Structure formats: C-alpha cells, structure tokens
Image: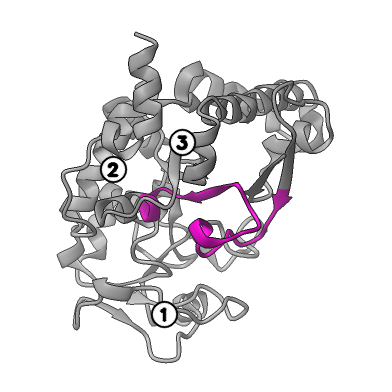
Amino acid sequence: MIRLALRDWDFITPLLLGDLVSDRFELKIERLAALPEDFASDPRFDASEISFSRYTTGRARGETGVVGIPNFIMRGFRHRCVVTAADSKLTRFDELRGKRIGIAGWQDSGNTWTRAAMAEGGLGIEDAYWAVSRLAADHPITDRVGRYARPGRIEALPGQPPLLDLLAAGEIDAVLMPFMPKGFFSKGSRFRALLPDVRGAERDYFGKVGYVPGMHIIGLKPELAAREPWLAQALSDLLDESQRIWLEKRRRYADTTPWLIDELVRSGHDLPESWNESGLAANRTMITAFIEQLRIQQLADTDLTPETLFPVASALEGANR
C-alpha cells in the first residue's frame, strides 16, 4: 500500500470515491490542509505533494532525501495573485516601485513565479520593500523568510501582524496571495487583483513562455523509488487519469456553478490540451525557467538541470528513446 499525502484538490475525487483504482498497487490518500513540514523524515507517508521550490533548493544543497516526480499537482498563473485594496489606484506592477509589498513566504514556489511575472512587468526585487508576515490572524507564526532576509529590503515584521489587515489599513500597498482571501469573491470585497485584466496578462504570458507555472510536485521516499522503479511513473499516470476523468465530469455537470461552462469553454480555447501534461519532456522548458529564477532571485546558487533535478524521470525518458 502506498500512503500519499495531498491537499484537498477536486480532481482527486475519482480516486477518493474508488471510481479509479490501480491494478498495480493499493493507494491510500490522506487529505491534509497543511502538507508535511519535512516529508523526507515523516514516517506517515510514502509519497507526498511537496513544494517545487523547496525540493529544488534542497537538491541544490545536495539533499537526496526525496525523489521528485515531475507531476505538477498544483500549477497556475500568478498575475492574479498580486492583490491590493479595492479602492487602490494601482493597476500595474511597475506602479509598485518604492511601495511596500506583503509576502507570507519568501522562497515559496508561487511567490517565486509571481516575482518573475512582476519583474517582467517592470518591478524587480530591488524596486520595492518586502514585508514578510502571516496572511491572516488564524495563520501560525513561523519563520517565513529564513536566510533570505535583508535589512531595509526583505524584512520579517515584528510579531507577524496579518498582512491582509495591514493592506486594508493602507499600511502596505499589495500582498502576494497563494489563494484568494476570505470575502474576495463577494460583492463589496475589500480587496481586488492589482491588474485590471489578469486573464489578458496571463494569456499573453502563456503565449510568450508556453507553460503554466508549476508550484507543487509529487515526492517519493528514495528507498521506495529504488525498490519499485516502476512506481513513480505509475503513480503519476494514475493522478493524471484522475484529472482527466474529473475534467470530463466538470464539463458534463457544470451547472453546479453558474457560468462555469463558459469558463471551461474559454480555458479550452485559450490553452492547448497539453497545458497540464506531466513528465520531464512536457515540462523541461518550465523547469529550466524555474531553476533560472532561483539563480536570478538568489534563492540558490546551482548548476542543476531538469535531468539532474529529476533523475528517475530522466532515466526513464532515456530508456524509452
């Protein structure tokens, strides 16, 4: 039996309900609000959803306690994740020059991609002041900046006041959000996306780079990957099939949310069917770009390549040539 830790993604529903099962192994999924802090040493799980950034920076430091699978269980565009107050006059990334930006985790994969998008829009790290704290009062107090703190540029706020409260009070100008804040989807929300047309910006971004950024991947314990070399691909394929089944069901039963069918049509027209494909070959350009961002943003000094980052997938790719 393989014990897999995942966030509560909708597309794992076919696996949870037993509509989809593997004929090669038994899978037990544990749904978690917060992923294991240190999966490599966590005895509860054989596999887990893990941070792409933490995996990559760990590999750059020579860590080998996790074997990564290039199945990007969480990916998404990041332009929409820069949030400001509803009454703010800011509408472009470069208008944040000299402003204070809240961020809840400096090395997080999503925030790394967001800073890359902001840099493309004219705002580099050195152009703003970065306030590091928790997003809301019910979030834990923990080290969110670590070795990357720089006085006067990237600083942890004393006592970690909630960033959304500071934004509402006008004490900071924007916040990088992993998920939209409470009330964001309601009429009269205190917050809005900074860019007026995030969809247009993200569509243009995809047209330029050709990928949707990946934030989380699947990690395996190395002893399991060595003992069962077929398992990494089999697990990845099973998760992909669950996503395929769930997308078919959403397209059939879209009436659960008004206008969801319109969004599914637009997404199907704006993105190729392969946008969420797993594997090294399909994601090599995106993985290379992320490694480069780690260098540019001084998160890791590394000569990693997609092949050295994902050695099991690379070996499988070579064997199939």
The picture quadrant where one finds residue 200 is top left
Q: Which residue is mark 1?
A: 170
Relative to 94, is 269 above or below? above
**Disc 3 vs disc 2: which is toward the camera?**
3
Residue at x 78%, y 20% (from the top left corner): 252
How busy is the neighbourhood of tag 3: few (under 14 within 10 Å), some, or many (20 plus)? many
Residue at x 34%, y 33% (from the top left corner): 311
Q: Nearer the viewer, residue 95 or 55?
A: 55
Q: Residue placed farthest to the bottom in the image?
A: 159
Mark 3 element type: strand
Is residue 34 in the magenta section? yes
Residue at mark 1 to residue at mark 3: CA–CA distance: 42 Å
Q: Residue placed farthest to the top in the image?
A: 321
Residue at x 51%, y 82% (from the top left corner): 141
Determine which of the numbered discs, if any, sits on residue 290 in the image. 2
Earlier along the polypeptide chain: callout 3 or callout 2? Answer: 3
